[in-house]
Amino acid sequence: MKLERNSKAVLLRIYIGESDRYKGKPLYRYLVELFKKEGFYGATVLRGITGFGQTSNVHTTSILRLSTDLPIVIEVVDSREKIDEIKPVLDEIIKGGLIIEQEVEVWAYRGKEDESD
């Protein structure tokens, strides 16, 4: 599937902690490398300034309570087929956090002409 205007896709959003690790690497970095290796269209990592999860522990960048486990969100968009293929792998890798998916419609998908990896 090629991502073009008005094409249907799935947004997978993964909520984890900054201190989460897998095979000696930060989990968010491992996931981005996995998505790239598997040929996904792209992935973005967002670092939160504050948040809480199932344990209700607040993680924040507040100077009075500087957290070493800030919220991290990884977003990846691709076809339904690619997302469904990666779910069992993610189930093995991600031991804590939240994963949601949402059907989306692509409005634009462009790279810069001079962009290089």
Image (spheres, rainbow, N blue to C red):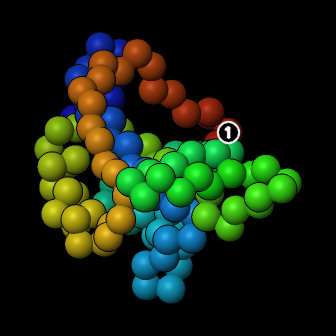
Task: Please identify the residue farthest to the bottom as the structure is shown.
Answer: 24
Q: Position of residue 17 (x, y in %)?
A: 52, 61
State the residue in front, 19 or 27: 19
State the residue in front, 94 or 5: 94
Crowding near the residue tagged with mark 1, few <14, some 14–19, many ≥20 C-alpha atoms within 10 Å: few
Q: Taking 102 as reference, is 36 above or below it?
A: below
Q: Quadrant of the C terminus?
A: bottom right
Q: Along the horizontal axis of the image, is 14 left or right of 67?
A: left
Task: Please identify the residue farthest to the right as the structure is shown.
Answer: 63
Q: Quadrant of the N terminus?
A: top left
Image label count: 1
Q: Residue at x 40, y 15 (%)?
A: 107
Q: Residue at x 59, y 52 (%)?
A: 58
Q: Where, by quadrant of the figure, is residue 91 drawn? A: bottom left
Q: Taking 36 as reference, is 109 above or below it?
A: above
Q: Amino acid at mark 1?
A: Asp
Q: Position of residue 106 (x, y in %)?
A: 35, 21
Question: Which residue, given by chain and number where applicable, does mark 1 sit on?
Answer: 114
Q: Residue at x 42, y 63 (%)?
A: 31
Q: Position of residue 82 (x, y in %)?
A: 20, 48
Q: Along the horizontal axis of the image, is 33 left or right of 40?
A: right
Q: Where, by quadrant of the figure, is residue 90 drawn? A: bottom left
Q: Position of residue 114 (x, y in %)?
A: 67, 39
Q: Where, by quadrant of the figure, is residue 78 drawn? A: top left
State the residue in front, 45 or 50: 50
Q: Residue at x 75, y 52 (%)?
A: 61
Residue 52 seen in this snapshot: yes
Q: Taking 90 as reference, is 73 above or below it?
A: above
Mark 1 lies on a secondary structure that is loop
Q: Along the horizontal axis of the image, is 66 left or right of 97?
A: right
Q: Taking 8 as reference, is 67 above or below it?
A: below
